[in-house]
Image: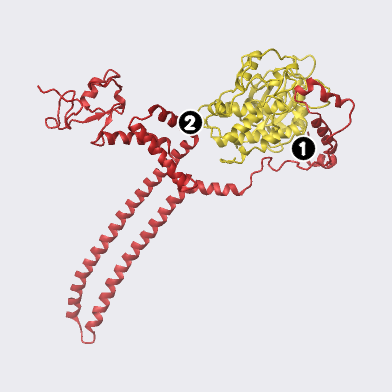
């Protein structure tokens, strides 16, 4: 049994601009699933781009820290349906709920799972390009899974230009803010870094009110990139004369993240190096001593 | 009327309302850690009812609040003051001997605590010392919280042990008194019995033998109580150990955990690539990109591209699609 006959839809869980999510059951295994029905009405050019991207990349990736795409089928109304695993919570909800106490171990565990998932995407040549707490779902056992591959893309030929208008603003890397067109996995690492900071602070680390303000906040927090530390930065399309802010010293960071250990700060600094070619890769981040020190994840 | 000497207030007199212990024995003195001037309870309520007010002592301009007043524990105010300061310092400097590698380091740490207490008590370099204290509490925020939690746990353990000991002691006393009671009974009973039996004794029964059986009886009963006591002792020991172990359970768990080696990649990582990578590939088109400032500034690395391409080419080698099709679900 496959396709539409294998699933029942029961409750509506939520609705977005381009999809409705239902709770359902896979009849053959009696497993609970989430069914994402992509709306086709209203799109005269056919399917929405992000739906195609989501299917394309999710069926490539199978990893404990990436949401599982169980099946895809089209129903009687010719709507595309994605069958995904049920993940009841997300990181944003957890961080905002002040009744939940988050310890150092939790942060470490989540960061580890996030990095493992991102590492898996990157080694398969896939950029997620929209990492944020809202897109990091949690299952009932507390496992973190990366979801929403609507903005993901494959790294292909180097001469192709990529759009710099990706990633939710607060998690956008500096090279994207400067309008770079040939960025790499480093943009995802930056997002992971800001999420790490957000997990420790429990409030967004760099909440810009608009794109220009985002850049100002970013350089206020992490210093202004100079040609010296980031060769070529002034040639990027959106680079204008910037106020020079100093790069924060270790002590300033320590004051900002009072509960963080030195290893945690080294990792954070590594993931938030302004120059994308010097920024740590997922591999480097996973090898950080932060994960080996007490408390162990 | 004799003017009161404010610098040397009599022991049992409230300098504000002039009530003394002789006439009103229920008077209670309170002090405020701001200035350590003693005032009676009624005056505290009256003067500070409407919020913070200055200290009623002349030449003391400290503004005091009612909720900071506390009962005086020590008669000597200097001792009282030192205890307060010490309590404050210790709440921040709360490491234990086991936290240090050598005894010398621990001694140094204690010395530091004493220095701070001494400085604060004698008002020497107050600002500098306060800053030091504050800096230490910021630097060691995490370990301070941890140590406080540990202290609380230890206190809990102590309370539990104390309760257990009390239970054990009362139980032991009960059994002991029972033994004594029984002994007394037996003595009386045996006297009666001996006389009884000796009276009815026939010639073939040896009085020695009768006495022997009775003595055996007594000893047997005593032994029964003794063994009961032993059992109680064993039970108490066990429970005590259990409480001690229970609170160390966290440590044991940690030991077990560390036996599983930590793998950052969850074992899912290809350290050795299936191909040999050269540092330099000649590609007339892509090599140009290495010098393009737009590419450099975006963080693009040509080697990453080569590696990715090779990876894509090689990673299909060990996949047999027909096998995968059979085993996997429909996608």
Query: Seen from this angle, which residue lies furthest bottom?
Result: B204
Residue A59 percent across, percent down from the top left: 76, 32
Residue plotted at (51% across, 27% down): A98
Q: Does A221 sit above or below residue B180? A: above
Q: Nearer the viewer, residue A261 or A76?
A: A261
Location of the C terminus of chain B (image quadrant)? top right
Determine which quarter of the picture holds residue A147.
Answer: top right
Q: Does A17 sit above or below residue B99? A: above
- Left or right? Give the position of B175 relative to A152: left
Visual hue assigned to chain A? yellow
Query: Seen from this angle, which residue lies furthest left?
Result: B1
Q: Earlier in the sequence, mark 2 or mark 1?
A: 2
For disc 2, the marked residue is B138
Determine which quarter of the picture holds residue A269.
Answer: top right
Query: Seen from this angle, which residue lies furthest front?
Result: B124
Residue A3 percent across, percent down from the top left: 77, 31
Question: What's the distance in space between the residues labelled 2 and 1, CA to CA?
Answer: 55 Å
* Subunit under mark 2: B
Disc 2 and disc 1 on one polypeptide chain: yes
Q: Nearer the viewer, residue A4 or B206?
A: B206
Visual hue assigned to chain B? red
Disc 2 element: helix
Q: Is residue A44 visible to us here? A: yes
Q: Does A206 sit above or below residue A28? A: above
Q: Check disc 2: other Cα within 10 Å, few if <14, some if 14-19, many if 20+.
A: some
Q: Does B54 sit above or below residue B237? A: above
Q: Which mark is residue B329?
A: 1
- Left or right? Give the position of B249 relative to B39: right
Determine which quarter of the picture holds residue A169.
Answer: top right
Q: Which mark is residue B78?
A: none
In this view, the mark in front (2 or 1): 2
- Left or right? Give the position of A229 relative to A259: right
């Amino acid at each position: 049994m496959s396709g539409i006959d294998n699933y029942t839809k029961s409750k509506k869980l939520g609705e977005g601009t381009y999809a409705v999510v239902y709770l359902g059951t896979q009849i053959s295994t009696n497993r609970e699933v989430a069914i994402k029905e992509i709306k086709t009405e209203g799109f005269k050019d056919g399917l929405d781009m992000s739906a195609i991207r989501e299917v394309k990349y999710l069926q490539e990736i199978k990893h404990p820290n990436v949401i599982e795409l169980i099946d895809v089928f089209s129903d009687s109304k010719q709507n595309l349906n994605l069958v995904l695993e049920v993940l009841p919570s997300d990181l944003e909800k957890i961080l905002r709920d002040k009744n939940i106490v988050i310890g150092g171990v939790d942060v470490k565990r989540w960061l580890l799972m996030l990095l493992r998932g991102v590492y898996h995407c990157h080694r398969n040549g896939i950029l997620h390009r929209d990492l944020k707490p809202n897109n990091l779902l949690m299952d009932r056992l507390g496992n973190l899974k990366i979801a929403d591959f609507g903005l993901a893309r494959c790294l292909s030929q180097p001469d192709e230009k990529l759009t710099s208008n990706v990633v939710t603003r607060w998690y956008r890397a500096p090279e994207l803010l400067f309008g770079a067109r040939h960025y790499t996995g480093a943009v995802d690492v930056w997002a992971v870094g800001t999420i790490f900071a957000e997990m420790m602070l429990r409030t967004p680390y760099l909440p810009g009110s608009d794109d220009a303000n985002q850049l100002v906040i970013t350089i206020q927090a992490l210093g202004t990139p100079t040609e010296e530390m980031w060769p070529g930065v002034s040639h990027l399309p959106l680079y204008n004369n910037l106020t020079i802010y100093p790069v924060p010293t270790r002590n300033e960071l320590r004051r900002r993240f009072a509960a963080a250990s030195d290893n945690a700060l080294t990792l954070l600094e590594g993931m938030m190096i302004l120059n994308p070619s010097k920024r740590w890769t997922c591999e480097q981040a996973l090898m950080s001593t932060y994960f080996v020190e007490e408390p162990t994840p | 009327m004799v003017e009161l000497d404010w610098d040397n207030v009599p022991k049992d007199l409230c300098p504000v309302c002039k009530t003394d212990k002789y006439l009103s024995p229920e008077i209670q003195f309170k002090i405020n850690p701001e200035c350590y001037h003693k005032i009676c309870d009624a005056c505290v309520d009256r003067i500070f009812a409407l919020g913070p007010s200055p200290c009623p002592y002349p030449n003391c301009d400290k503004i005091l609040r009612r909720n900071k007043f506390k009962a005086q524990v020590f008669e000597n105010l200097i001792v009282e003051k030192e205890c307060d300061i010490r309590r404050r310092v210790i709440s921040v400097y709360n490491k234990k001997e086991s936290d240090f590698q050598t005894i010398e380091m621990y001694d140094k740490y204690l010395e530091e605590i004493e220095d701070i207490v001494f400085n604060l008590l004698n008002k020497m370099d107050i600002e500098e010392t306060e800053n030091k204290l504050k800096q230490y509490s910021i630097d060691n925020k995490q370990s301070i919280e941890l140590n406080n939690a540990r202290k609380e746990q230890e206190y809990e353990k102590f309370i539990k042990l104390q309760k257990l000991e009390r239970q054990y002691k009362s139980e032991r006393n009960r059994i002991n008194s029972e033994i004594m009671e029984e002994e007394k009974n037996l003595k009386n009973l045996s006297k009666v019995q001996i006389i009884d039996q000796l009276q009815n004794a026939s010639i073939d029964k040896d009085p020695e033998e009768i006495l022997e059986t009775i003595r055996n009886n007594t000893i047997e009963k005593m032994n029964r109580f003794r063994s009961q006591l032993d059992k109680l002792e064993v039970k108490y020991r066990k429970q005590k150990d259990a409480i001690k172990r229970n609170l160390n359970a966290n440590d044991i768990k940690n030991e077990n955990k560390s036996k599983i080696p930590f793998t950052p990649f969850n074992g899912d990582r290809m350290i050795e690539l299936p191909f040999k990578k050269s540092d330099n590939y000649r590609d007339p088109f892509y090599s140009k990109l290495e010098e393009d400032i737009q590419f450099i500034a975006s963080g693009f690395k040509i080697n990453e591209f080569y590696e990715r391409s090779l990876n894509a080419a090689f990673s299909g080698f060990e996949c047999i699609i027909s096998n995968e099709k059979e085993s996997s679900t429909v996608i």
